[in-house]
C-alpha cells in the first residue's frame, strides 16, 4: 500500500505551502517507504509515498499521460491493468512506466470521469486535469484502501490515505465513501459502484458449488500479480486456509514463482498455545508451505496499543483487539523481506460467517444483514487489514472482496447460506461445500469444517481477557460514571472502550475525527439491527465471538457481563517473555 495526499485549490502556491504539504506527506511514509514524490500545479499539490510492488524500478509517482497534462497519485493495485493497457495501446496511447496504475490517466483521456468501474482492483486515487484545472478522486468498491476527505477554511479540498495527513489542517473532514467518485466540477460525490446486491433485494440464483469455487479461485489467482516477495496470512481458519490452499495450488507457473520460487510462505501470529497457531501449523504442513509462526504475549500487545491506535485511527473495540496481533505480525513479516500478503477478510460478511448468524430468523433478514456488513467493511476489517499492515510498509490483498466474486456470492439465494444444525449446515456451509474435493482435497476435512473464530479470539482467548484486565487498572468507576459527559458521541460503555477512546482523542482531538468511527451496540460483531434476533443478547453486549451464548464452543458463561469476564491482577501481564519468532530461521527466496 502507498500513501497519497492531495491539497487542491488552496489559494497558496508559496514555498512555505509546499514545505507544509511535504511535512504532512511524511506522516504517511510508513505506508510507502520506497520513494516519495510531489507534483505542484499552481495551488494544487499531489504527494505520494510509494510502496513498490509492480515495476519497482520505474513506477514512481505521480504518474502522467503522454504530454503530462493529466496527473495521478494512486494507492492500490489494478489487477486487470494488462488487459486495459492493450486496449489503450491499440487506441494510440503510450505508457511511461510498467506500473499497473499507469492506465488511470489514459482511461480518463478516453472516457472522462466514467471509467472507474473499468478498474478491477483495490485503489484510491486523485487525478488532476491541468488543462482546465479540474480534478476527481475515487475509492474502490468496498473500501479496501483507506481514504479521507477534508475541507479547509481557504476553500481547499484535501484527500489523504489516513487521518493524520489532513486532520491538523482541515476545518472539517470525514471518511471518503467507498464506491464513490468526487468531482470538482460538481463539488460532490457520485456513486460509481451500483451492484444489484447494494439495494438489499433478495436474490434467487440457485447455489452451484462449482461456480462459487471457480469464482474464488479466479479472485485468488489474479492477486498473484507481483514483482516482489510475498506470502499468505494463515490463521488456520476456513478463509485464510482456502486462500493459502488455492495460492499453493496455482503458484507454480506464475511470473511470481519464476521470480521468487514456487514454494509458498505462510505467516501466523498468536499467544502460545492459541487455537490459531495449532490449526495454522497443521494447514501449513498439509500444503507444504514455508511456515513462519510468531508468538506474542499479552504484555507485548498492551505495550503496542498506543501505536496501534495511532496507525489504525479508530477507537472501535473489536478493531483494536484484532489489529494489535496483526500489527505485531506485520512488523515481523516485513523484517523477512516480504512486501505483500494475501489475506482472508470479507468472507464472514458475504456468507454470514459470524456466529450470531445462527440466530437469523429467515433468509430475508440473513441476506440484509450480510449487505449491511459488507457496506460497513471499510470501517472495520478493511480498515484493520489495510492500516495494520501499511504501518510497516506491507500490502494486504483480499480476494474475498473481489468485485466479480462478490457478484457471484451475493446473487445466490440466501436460503442456501442459512445455518441449519439439524442438517449439519454450519456457518459458511456453501463455501465449505464448494471446496470439498475427495479426489484432490484442498484442505483436511476437519479444517474445512472448523468453527468460526474471530481473529481477536483465535490468537488466544486470554488476549481479550488481558485487555479487559488492563483497562480495569487504568479506568476507574468514577471515570465511567461521567463517561457520557466526557464523550457524548459514541459514549464508551465499558472500561476497555473508555481506555481506547482516551488514547484516540489524544492523537486526534478534532470533533471530525471522532465522527469517523462507527458506534452502536454489537454482539459477536453484529450490526445493531441483528441484536433483535435474540432477546438475551441485549444483556451480554460484547463484540467477541464468545459472546454468542449457546453457539460458540468456548462461549462466555451465562449472565457473566462483558467487563467482568476475568479478574486478573497485574502479575498476569508482567514479567513475561518478549515476542518470539519460532518460524524458519530465514526467508529463502529462490532466484
Image: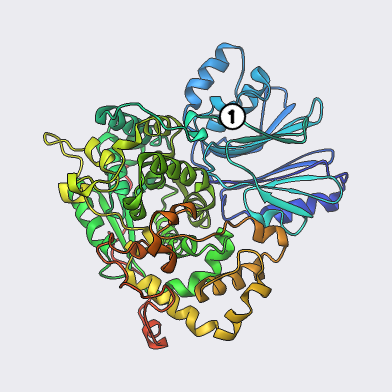
Is residue 397 visible to us here?
no
For residue 59, side relative to residue 239 (left or right): right
Report x, y in % for residue 520: 54, 59
Q: Residue at x 24, y 46 (%)?
A: 420
Report x, y in % for residue 279: 23, 57
Is residue 540 visible to us here?
yes
6 or 52, which is in the foreground? Answer: 6
The image shows residue 449, relative to residue 195, as above or below, that is: below
Q: Residue at x 57, y 49 (%)?
A: 32
393 or 241, which is in the foreground? Answer: 241
Residue identifier under label 1: 102
Which of the 4 image quadrants contains residue 492? Answer: bottom right
Q: How many marks?
A: 1
566 or 80, which is in the foreground? Answer: 566
Instruction: Sort mark 1 into few (<14), some (14-19) or many (20+) by Cα contacts within 10 Å.
Output: many
For residue 344, side relative to residue 490 (left or right): left
Which of the 4 image quadrants contains residue 342? Answer: top left
Q: Residue at x 53, y 28 (%)?
A: 119
The image shows residue 103, relative to residue 396, as above or below, that is: above
The local secondary structure at tag 1 comes to helix
For residue 230, side relative to residue 450 (left or right): right
301 or 410, which is in the foreground? Answer: 410
Q: Quadrant of the C terminus?
A: top left
Amino acid at each position: 500500500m502507498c500513501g497519497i495526499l492531495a491539497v487542491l485549490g488552496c489559494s497558496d502556491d508559496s514555498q512555505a505551502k509546499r514545505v507544509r504539504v511535504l511535512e504532512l506527506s511524511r506522516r504517511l511514509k510508513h505506508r510507502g517507504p520506497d520513494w516519495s514524490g510531489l507534483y505542484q500545479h499552481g495551488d494544487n499539490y499531489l504527494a505520494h509515498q510509494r510502496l513498490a510492488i509492480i515495476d519497482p524500478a520505474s513506477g514512481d509517482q505521480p504518474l502522467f499521460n503522454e504530454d503530462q497534462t493529466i496527473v495521478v497519485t494512486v494507492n492500490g493495485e489494478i489487477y486487470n491493468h494488462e488487459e486495459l493497457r492493450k486496449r489503450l495501446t491499440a487506441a494510440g496511447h503510450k505508457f511511461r512506466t510498467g506500473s499497473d496504475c499507469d492506465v488511470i490517466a489514459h482511461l480518463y483521456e478516453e472516457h472522462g470521469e466514467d471509467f472507474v468501474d473499468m478498474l478491477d482492483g483495490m485503489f484510491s486515487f486523485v487525478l488532476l486535469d491541468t488543462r482546465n484545472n479540474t480534478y476527481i478522486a475515487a475509492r474502490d468498491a468496498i473500501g479496501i484502501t483507506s481514504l479521507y476527505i477534508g475541507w479547509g477554511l481557504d476553500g481547499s479540498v484535501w484527500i489523504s490515505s489516513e487521518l493524520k495527513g489532513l486532520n491538523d489542517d482541515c476545518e472539517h473532514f470525514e471518511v471518503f465513501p467507498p464506491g464513490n467518485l468526487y468531482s470538482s466540477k460538481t463539488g460532490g460525490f457520485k456513486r460509481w459502484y451500483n451492484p444489484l446486491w447494494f439495494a438489499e433485494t433478495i436474490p434467487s440464483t440457485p447455489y452451484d458449488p462449482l461456480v462459487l469455487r471457480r469464482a474464488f479461485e479466479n479472485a485468488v489467482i489474479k492477486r498473484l500479480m507481483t514483482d516482489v516477495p510475498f506470502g499468505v496470512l494463515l490463521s488456520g481458519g476456513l478463509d485464510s486456509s482456502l486462500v493459502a490452499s488455492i495460492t499453493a495450488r496455482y503458484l507454480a507457473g506464475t511470473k511470481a514463482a519464476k521470480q521468487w520460487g514456487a514454494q509458498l510462505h505462510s505467516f501466523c501470529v498468536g499467544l502460545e498455545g492459541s487455537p490459531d497457531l495449532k490449526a495454522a501449523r497443521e494447514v501449513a504442513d498439509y500444503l507444504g508451505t514455508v511456515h513462519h509462526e510468531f508468538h506474542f504475549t499479552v504484555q507485548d500487545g498492551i505495550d503496542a496499543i498506543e501505536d496501534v491506535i495511532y496507525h489504525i485511527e479508530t477507537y472501535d473495540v473489536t478493531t483494536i483487539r484484532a489489529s494489535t496481533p496483526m500489527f505485531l505480525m506485520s512488523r515481523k513479516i516485513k523484517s523477512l523481506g516480504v512486501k505483500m500478503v494475501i489475506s482472508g477478510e470479507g468472507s464472514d460478511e458475504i456468507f454470514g460467517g459470524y456466529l450470531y448468524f445462527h440466530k437469523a430468523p429467515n433468509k430475508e433478514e440473513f441476506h440484509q444483514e450480510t449487505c449491511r456488513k459488507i457496506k460497513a467493511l471499510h470501517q472495520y476489517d478493511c480498515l484493520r487489514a489495510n492500516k495494520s499492515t501499511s504501518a510497516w510498509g506491507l500490502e494486504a490483498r483480499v480476494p474475498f472482496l473481489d468485485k466479480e466474486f462478490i457478484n457471484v456470492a451475493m446473487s445466490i439465494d440466501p436460503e442456501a447460506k442459512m445455518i441449519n444444525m439439524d442438517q449439519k449446515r454450519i456457518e459458511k456451509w456453501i463455501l465449505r461445500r464448494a471446496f470439498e474435493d475427495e479426489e484432490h482435497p484442498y484442505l483436511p476435512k476437519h479444517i474445512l469444517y472448523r468453527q468460526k473464530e474471530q481473529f481477536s479470539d483465535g490468537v488466544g482467548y486470554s488476549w481479550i481477557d488481558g485487555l479487559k484486565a488492563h483497562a480495569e487498572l487504568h479506568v476507574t468507576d468514577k471515570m465511567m460514571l461521567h463517561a457520557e459527559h466526557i464523550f457524548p458521541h459514541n459514549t464508551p460503555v465499558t472500561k476497555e472502550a473508555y481506555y481506547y477512546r482516551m488514547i484516540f482523542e489524544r492523537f486526534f482531538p478534532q470533533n471530525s475525527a471522532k465522527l469517523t468511527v462507527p458506534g452502536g451496540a454489537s454482539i459477536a460483531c453484529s450490526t445493531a439491527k441483528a441484536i433483535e434476533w435474540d432477546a438475551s443478547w441485549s444483556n451480554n453486549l460484547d463484540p467477541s465471538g464468545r459472546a454468542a451464548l449457546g453457539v460458540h464452543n468456548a462461549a462466555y458463561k451465562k449472565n457473566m457481563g462483558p467487563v467482568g469476564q476475568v479478574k486478573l491482577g497485574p502479575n498476569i501481564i508482567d514479567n513475561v517473555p518478549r515476542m518470539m519468532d519460532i518460524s524458519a530461521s530465514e526467508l529463502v527466496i529462490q532466484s
